[in-house]
Amino acid sequence: MERAKITAIILAAGLSRRMGQPKMLLPWGETSVLGKVLNTLTQAGLEDLIVMSGGTRQLIEAEVARLATNGLPVRAIFNPQYEAGEMMSSVRAGLAAIGPQAEYALIALGDQPQLSVESARRVVAAAQRSDAQLVLPSFEMRRGHPWLVRRDLWPELISAETGRAFLQAHASKILYVETDETVMKDLDTPEDYQQGLNRV
């Protein structure tokens, strides 16, 4: 069976108010928080990555350009509506930027450097294996990120007010994939960042 083509939308348009500085650019191992997310997704088999910039546009886009010169298949797209609800406005702008060849969009968080390659691979493999409309990772009966959304549901996702409302409306279409706890971990505060670094 031919592999479904997947484009990843990485949400990085927020202002990082709770962190106090652009969290996607903080050091993480030998790269940045954003760089680690992108490395994980490429190691999971993704070959087309879109990073959504917003409140710290110039800094994020400079980092994306740097990572692209290192060989990552990534480009940046600016979300001009980033202040009006960063997540859903970025999802909409990202979907609009995806070419016609993609069959799925993977919605990933730019502040999730602890996401394991194995968990990302499991989500991707489930879509390849099942042709499901929605694939979500699950840890101990709680859903996390990233999500996979098949193209025929994109209009519904675009029109949804929130991600939660979209998932509730299409609950019967969700294929849950058991993963590790990294699908639940993102960085919102300096404490989150320090705790994550301690595990690197």
Image: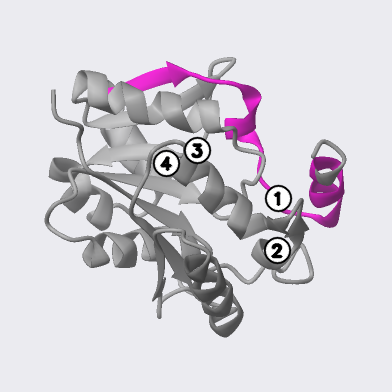
* Mark 4 or mark 3, whichever is nearer to me: 3
Q: Are marks 4 and 1 in contact (CB under 8 Å)?
A: no
Q: CA distance from mark 1 to mark 3?
A: 13 Å
Question: Dot 3: what SS?
Answer: loop
Label 4 or label 3, whichever comes before in sequence order: 3
On whether residue 149 falls in the magenta region, the answer is no
Q: CA distance from mark 1 to mark 2?
A: 8 Å
Q: Are marks 1 and 2 in contact (CB under 8 Å)?
A: yes
Question: Dot 1: what SS?
Answer: loop
Q: Position of residue 70 (x, y in %)?
A: 53, 64
Label 4 or label 1, whichever comes before in sequence order: 4
Residue at 56%, 73% (x, y): give it.
Answer: 66
Q: In the rendered image of this protein, does residue 64 appear above or below residue 104?
A: below
Q: Which residues are magenta?
A: 173-196
Residue under numbered circle 4: 164
Residue under numbered circle 2: 23
Label 1 or label 3, whichever comes before in sequence order: 3
Residue under numbered circle 1: 187
Residue under numbered circle 3: 145
